[in-house]
Amino acid sequence: MAGRAEFSLQGRQAFYFALLLAPPLLWLGIVYLGSLLTLLLQSFYAIDEFTARIVPEFTLATYRQLLTQPAHIDIIVRTLLMATAVTLAAAVIAFPVALYMARYAGPRTKALFYVGVMLPMWTSYLVKVYAWRLILAKQGIASWGFEHLGLMGALDQALAVPIVGGPSLASSYIGMFVVFVYMWLPFMILPLAAALERVPASLLQASADLGARPGQTFRNVVLPLALPGLAAGSIFTFSLTLGDYIIPSVVGAPGYFIGMMVYQQQGTAGNLPLAAAFSVVPIVLIGLYLMLARRLGAFDAL
Amino acid sequence: MRSEQARRPSWERPSRFTRVMAAAGLVFLHAPVWVIALYAFTTEDRTYQFPPPGLTLHWFEVAFARDDIWESMRLSLLVASAATLLAVILGTLAAFALARRTFSGKESITLLFVLPIALPGILTGLALLAGIRTLGLEPGFWTIVAGHATFCLVIVYNNVVARLRRIPPSWVEASMDLGARGHQTFRYVLLPQIATALLAGGMLAFALSFDEIIVTLFTAGHERTLPIWFYSELFRPRERPVTNVVAVVVVLVTLVPILLAYYLTRPDERGSE
């Protein structure tokens, strides 16, 4: 009797469970995963060169086109270099902010810092990009500031550097780099602060008691324990830079980035298979990056 | 000797460098938003000259009279409402299903529930477009909503699931022991507990949808949401100061729900964690 009651309850629970899970699971399974699979499938199709129509037959021609054309390789390398530079700069700038908010700020200042980091993160993406275009424009605030600090010469010299320079900050890789770092900085600060908050104060004390200088404590205690936070943050900065196509088209130099290529190929160029193949590149790069991070022990302290 | 030791740099106290850099970082994050606010009032309408030669409220009036802006605003509000509604329903169902149960295959399901925000937006956008084209659908209002709901439901799910896990299981047991039926336990025990998390998730979802551009450009067809209006204005500006005014309005529209969401989910001081 008791056994039967229990059994029926479990049966009912299972029924309710299925009832709860089915709608969201079907949504993500069909709308999202289904679309992703369609996209993957598209990358194995190719465009007929004469009719410009997609030929729905399995072929590796699109991937061959992706990986053999020097222009395409340039785009991938350029995007990868930018993502790496942005990640490194974001980590360096984020560290003192995260350190202060995690370990030194009192409860009130800490709350202020958290809101202070989260608000810009959630502020309209486009508005922020646009703000930077105003700031970096020829007569904008950046050049006004440089002029008043008497650094106009330095700015001109930086802009005169081949490749990274350009006619103005708003149309150079330097400007684009600044905007990328700005946009993804909160995504680095928050996980880093979470990791630094978990560093036990006793370890720092012990390190100091054993005669380590602050620099040594930083290298041997703080940094290894902050590594999971740095890894988590860098996955954001890396992957967000790899996939972005708005920033390079609004602020920046004429060179193409992966995201722009995806957008252009599906749109004006009408080559959905090549766009699909290009969009697979960030996934592969992020996968490789995760493997590398794991091998370097970035997740060991988790 | 002793005082010298006390002044030696240590990890007990922040160095001046750390303090200055932390403050500078915070200023760096906020300054650009204030710049936009300033430019909405400039009298200069052709260049981005700084400092602005004069200040005026004229551009608010001009923006207010522009029908194309109202049209896009209306569409964005409709899209965000529909996407939020869908996301709240789907995300809450998923949170209730997955909060406490353990079963085989749970890990892959939870992975599926973070994927839409973990993968680059351009991938979601292009994938949805490929799906839309394969099905032969016409991109428009509902394809925008479907795209937004997909990543918004992840936000709602995360908010609600975190709150559900904080409710002690004994509360539900006590309710059942006292003879409450399932729906009564939900109505009188669980719902009051998750209400603020649900509201916060919904607000964040709304803000996220209202502002979304990366996915929307792929799924919108000929529709022009406010971000798409803004985006095209960046390349073919009609009246630059009007764009600045719209930027300020967009920031305010998204900021209010985000701040509310923050205060609703702030870890409370009674120490339930």
Image: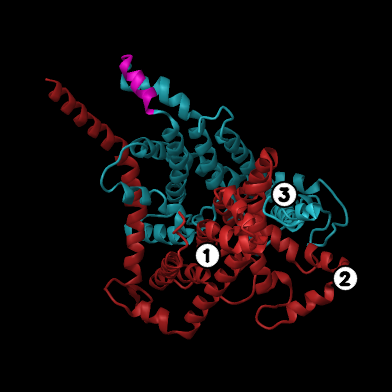
Chain colours: A red, B cyan
Residue where numbered disc 2 is placed: A150
Residue drawn where x is 79% and y is 77% of the image = A156
Question: Magenta residues, as a range?
Answer: B169-179
Work out how far the residue at label 1 is from the one at label 3, CA to CA, in angstroms. Answer: 32 Å
* Residue type beneath disc 1: Phe
Residue A165 badge = none
Secondary structure beneath disc 1?
Answer: helix
> Please, which residue is most extreme toward the left here?
A1
Label 3 – label 2 distance at C-alpha = 32 Å
Residue at left offset 84%, top offset 72%: A151
Mark in front: 1 vs 3 = 1
> What residue is shown with label 3?
B245
Classify mark 2: residues with Cα within 10 Å, few (<14), some (14-19) or many (20+): few
Question: At numbered mark 2, what does the secondary structure look like: helix, strand or loop?
Answer: loop
The chain to which mark 1 is attached is: A
Residue denoted by label 1 = A238
Q: Chain of mark 3?
A: B
Would residue A276 be found to the left or right of residue A147 on screen? Answer: left
